[in-house]
Amino acid sequence: MLDEQAKTTILRTMPHALYICGVKEGDEINGFTASWVMQSSFKPPLVVNCVRNDSRSHAMIKASGVFALTFLELGQKDIAQKFFKPQRLVGSKFEDLEFYLGETGCPILSDSLGYIECNVVGSVEKGDHSVFVGEVIAAGVHREGEILSLASTGWNYGG
Ligand SMILES: Cc1cc2nc3c(=O)[nH]c(=O)nc-3n(C[C@H](O)[C@H](O)[C@H](O)COP(=O)(O)O)c2cc1C
């Protein structure tokens, strides 16, 4: 029998950073706060990005086959807070924020450490999140700094 309490407690010790995953579908753009992200290959350069099945962004990534990850800096909790709200409730999350569209057409926040852009080259659709495997096709550094960690926010996502 799975010890639910132990599972939650130990999984919540896994370190995560916070990113804004920028997505698009046609002319529409959107983004969400992402934490279940990691590297998965040097050659070719791959990352995995786990995305909630019921989010607007999930449908947009499936339709377009691309996503961008903006790396937030320690202290940018307010931006992460804005982007964890669903688009269907709050509408555009990019109002009041400076951003530009990358090579993939996905939005990237200017006030951040930097970004990567990915083409989706595979996916695993099990459970309530899908794993999108992204090949990194563009990257940029805006400034040096420490990444916004999930631990620094006092929030939990996972367990
Ligand atoms: C701290 C934190 C971390 C999150 N990490 C993820 C994640 O890794 N993947 C994901 O799909 N959603 C994650 N979310 C939830 C999304 O940000 C949320 O579902 C968002 O409303 C989706 O927006 P959309 O419907 O406009 O696409 C996280 C939320 C919080 C508060």
Image (spheres, rainbow, N blue to C red):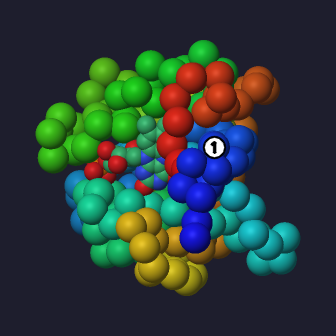
Could you tell me how many numbered marks the image carries? 1
Residue pushed farthest front? 1
Residue at x 69%, y 58% (from the top left corner): 38
36 to the left or right of 99: right
Residue pushed farthest top? 75
Residue 143: x percent and y percent?
73, 27
Label 1 CB-ligand 1 distance < 8 A: no
71 to the left or right of 41: left
Residue 21: x percent and y percent?
47, 49
Which quadrant would residue 15 be assigned to in this image? Answer: top right
Which quadrant would residue 137 be assigned to in this image? Answer: bottom right
Residue at x 53%, y 36% (from the top left corner): 156
Residue 150: x percent and y percent?
61, 33
Residue at x 43%, y 73% (from the top left corner): 127
- Is the residue 135 above or below the residue 114 in the image? below
- Is the residue 18 above or below the residue 136 in the image? above
Within 10 Å of disc 1 (Cα), the crowding (few <14, some 14-19, many 20+) is few
Position of the N terminus by quadrant: bottom right
Residue at x 56%, y 23% (from the top left corner): 154
101 to the left or right of 151: left
Residue 89: x percent and y percent?
15, 39
Find numbered disc 1 in the image and state the secondary structure of the residue it sits on: helix
- Is the residue 90 above or below the residue 8 in the image? above
Q: Which residue is mark 1?
A: 9
> What's under tag 1, amino acid-wise?
Thr
13 to the left or right of 127: right
Which quadrant would residue 37 be assigned to in this image? Answer: bottom right
**Front position in the image: 116 or 158:** 158
- Whether residue 97 is visible here, answered yes or no, is yes
- Whether residue 29 is visible here, answered yes or no, is no
